[in-house]
Amino acid sequence: MAVNLHIPAPELVFPVDGVEIGVTEAGIRKAGRRDLTVFRLAEGTSVAGVFTRNRFRAAPVQVCEEHLAQSLPIRAMVVNTGNANAGTGEPGLAAARATCDALAKLLGLDPRQVLPFSTGVILEPLPVDRIEAGLPAAVKALAPGNWTEAAHGIMTTDTLPKIVSSRANIGGHPITLTGISKGAGMIRPNMATMLGFLATDAAIAPALLKRMAGQVADVSFNRITVDGDTSTNDSFIIAATGRAGLRIESESDPLYPELLATLKAAATKLAQLIVRDAEGATKFMTIRVEDAGSQEEALKVAYSVAHSPLVKTAFYASDPNLGRILAAIGYAGIDDLDVGRVNLWLDDVWVAKNGGRNPDYREEDGQRVMKQAEIAVRISLGRGKVTETVYTCDFSHEYVSINADYRS
Amino acid sequence: MAVNLHIPAPELVFPVDGVEIGVTEAGIRKAGRRDLTVFRLAEGTSVAGVFTRNRFRAAPVQVCEEHLAQSLPIRAMVVNTGNANAGTGEPGLAAARATCDALAKLLGLDPRQVLPFSTGVILEPLPVDRIEAGLPAAVKALAPGNWTEAAHGIMTTDTLPKIVSSRANIGGHPITLTGISKGAGMIRPNMATMLGFLATDAAIAPALLKRMAGQVADVSFNRITVDGDTSTNDSFIIAATGRAGLRIESESDPLYPELLATLKAAATKLAQLIVRDAEGATKFMTIRVEDAGSQEEALKVAYSVAHSPLVKTAFYASDPNLGRILAAIGYAGIDDLDVGRVNLWLDDVWVAKNGGRNPDYREEDGQRVMKQAEIAVRISLGRGKVTETVYTCDFSHEYVSINADYRS
C-alpha cells in the first residue's frame, strides 16, 4: 500500500534530449518480466554518481566507481533486476565487467564507458549469459521516450514504478529533468537496493556535476530511511546531456544556485517515492530538526526519531505518543543536550514545550494530525542554526509480514 | 510469549541477610495491583547504581544520582509502578523528593538515605498522596523473604516476574545473591523502564562497589536491546549488605575476580530475563563479535546486527538470511573494514567465510539453527582481539500489535 504515490500521465513524462532507453525481458530470474534496461547517453554527457557506504559493496558498485574514476566519458548504463551481484566476490566482479564488455561491443564503446547496476537476490551468481543474450534486444529498443518502460524495468518488489519529470526555465533557458528510482525498504527479503537515475539536458561541467551529485544526494537519497538498513547496491546517478541551451561551468555562475535547487527538488521527490512505496507503509513522515548546533547532531536526532520502532509503530497506530519521540531525542547521543530547550510540533500542533508537555496541547489536536497520511514532525533543539530534514514511514504489521516471508 | 523464562521455585529464592522487602497495593494507577515496593537495607550496606544515559532523565533518576553522590549511606529504596514520573519537570522532582521524605520519616532516616524509582506511564504527574498513603502498609510488610513479592510488585506490562537467586562459595565464604528486574522492550506503549536490583550479603567497600556496578552493568544491562529504545528511567542498583563473612576492599584482593565474575553472571542472567520477556519475542539471540580492533567497533557491529529490523524479522521467520546479517555488519560504520576477513557462524554452522558464502555451507544447516528458540550469532571481524556480546530478540507481528495499541 503506497502513500500518495502517483505515476505521471505518459504525456507528462518528458524525454531528455540525449538519453535513449531500451528495455527487454532477459529471463534473468523469472520469465515474462522486463528485467534488463539499457541507457545510451549522447556524446558530451557528464555523468556523476553517489554510492552505498556499506562495506559489503556489490560488484557493480565497485565497477561503477572504477569507471567513473577514469577519464573516458561514460556513454551507457545497463541495469539488471533479479540478481544483485552482491556478496559474489571475484566472480561477481568478472560478471559485472563482462556485462560492460558485452554492451560496449554492441554500442561501439570502450567497456570503461559503461556503468553496470544490478538489483535483486544477493549472494547468487549473476547469470551473465542471459544478460549477454538479452542485450541486443534492449539495444534494438533504444528510444528517447522509454522512461516509463525503464521505471518498470528496474522494479523488483516495488509495488509501483517511480518517475519524476519536469520542465524548468533557468535564466531563460528551458531545461528538462526526468528521473526514475526503485526500492521499497532498503532490502526486501533479500532483494538488494535503492537505485536512482536522474537526467537533464542542461550542460554541466563534469567536475562540477560530481560535486553537485553529492550535494543533491545529501538532501534526497541520503535523507530517506525505511528501516535503517543500508543496502549493498545503493546507487544514484545524475547525467547531464548538454543538449539544452543552459551551460553551467562552475559554482560562481549566477544560474548555478537555481540549477542546483531544481536538481535537488527533482531528486528529493524521486527519493521520497521510495519511502511512499516502502514495505507496509501507511504514513509518510517528514522529520525536520531545527536549531541544531551542527549538521551531525541534527541528523543524529532526526535518524534517532526516524528509526525508533516505538515511534514508527505509534505513527502506524495514529497515536500522538509524545513520550516516545522525546525519548528518541534524548538517546540520540547529544551528551550536553539541554532538554529544557527542546520543542516539538506535529504539523502545526505544538506538542512539547521546553522539554515537557505543552500546557496548551490538547490530545485531540495531536490525534487529528496523527490520522493524516502525511505528517511533519518538527523538533527544535535550541542549540544553533542548523536544520536537517529526513523522510521516513511508519512501521506496520505488513512490514513484518513482508520481511518475515521466507525467501521465495 | 516469553522465551525460556523460568521463575525459580520459592525455596530457591534465597533471602539476602540485611535486606527486608515490603510490597503493597497503593492504587497508584489501578486498584487491586501490587504497585509499591520498599527495600530496607541494614546498616553497613554499600549501594551503587548505574542509570540511563537518556537526556530526558526521569525525576527519580536525578534524585537517585544526587543521593548516591552525598556521603550519608543509602538505607532504603522505594519503587512505584503505574507512573514513571518522567517528563514532569520541577513538580516531578518535588514529587520524587516528597516520596523520599515520607519513607525516611517512617524508617527514621534522613531523606537523602532513600533512593526512589518510578516506572509506568510517562508525562503524567506522580500521585504522591497515594504513595504516601500506601507507604505505612509497605513498611509494615517488611520481611526478608519477600523477593518474589517484589518481583511482582515492580512489574508493569511484563508478562512474568523476573528473579535470579544463587549461592556461591568464594574463598571458603558462602555468599548469597538475589536480584529482580523488570522491563519488556524498552518502553511499552508509554510505560517507561528497565529496572534491576541485585543484592548480596558480601561486604564490598562503597568506592569499589561503585566501580564494580559499572563493570557489571557493561556486560549485563548495558548489553541487552529489544528495539534500541533507551528509556528515561533505566536504573540498575547493587547493594552489598556485608552480613556474610566475605569482605572485599579493593581490586587487589585475591578473591575480587571471583566475586566480580559472580556478580556479572547474576546480573547478566537478570538482564537476559528482560530480553526473554520482550514484547512479542519468540527467539533469544546472543550476538557475539570477536576479533574486533576495539570495544567501540565490536559494539557498533553487535548493535548494528541486533537492531536491524531486517535481521530481526528474518530470525522471527527462522530464515537463515545471511545477506541481511552481512549488510548490517557492512553499514555498522567501520570505514576501513576489510570484508574479506569477516566470518559468520550461526551456532556451530559456518555460514560466511572470508566475506562471502562458505562453500561448504548448506542451507538446511542454517535452517536447523534458525528454528531453535535460542541462537548464537558469532561474527569474527579479523581486526584484533576484542570480543563483545549483546543479547536481543526477534521482531514479530506481536511486537507491532503491542506497540501500536493505543495507550490504554
Image (spheres, coloured by chain):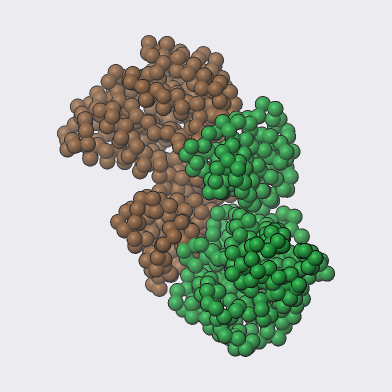
Chain colours: A green, B brown
Residue A155: give x, y in percent of width and height.
66, 68
Q: Residue furthest right?
A: A11
Residue B165 sits in quarter: top left
Residue A184 sits in quarter: bottom right
- When the figure is inspected, residue B76 is found, relative to residue A244, above or below; the finding is above
Describe residue A255's horizontal placement relative to residue B187 as left or right. right
Residue drawn 74% across the image and 58% down it: A5
Residue B128: give x, y in percent of width and height.
53, 18
Of residue B326 and residue B376, the one placed in the foreground of this image is B326
- When the figure is inspected, residue A331 is found, relative to residue B201, above or below; the finding is below
Q: Is residue A253 visible?
A: yes
Of residue B5 and residue A367, the one placed in the foreground of this image is A367
User: In which quadrant is the C terminus of chain A drawn?
Assistant: bottom right
Residue drawn 41% across the image and 62% down it: B337
Residue A200: give x, y in percent of width and height.
71, 70
Of residue A276 and residue A260, the one placed in the foreground of this image is A260
Residue B168: give x, y in percent of width and height.
24, 35
Describe residue B55's horizontal placement relative to residue B217 as left or right. right
Give the total of numbered labels: 0
Residue B406 sits in quarter: top right
Residue drawn 45% across the image and 18% down it: B100
User: In which quadrant is the N terminus of chain A drawn?
Assistant: bottom right
Q: Is residue A160 visible?
A: no
Residue drawn 34% across the image and 60% down it: B383
- When the figure is inspected, residue B235 is found, relative to residue A98, above or below; the finding is above
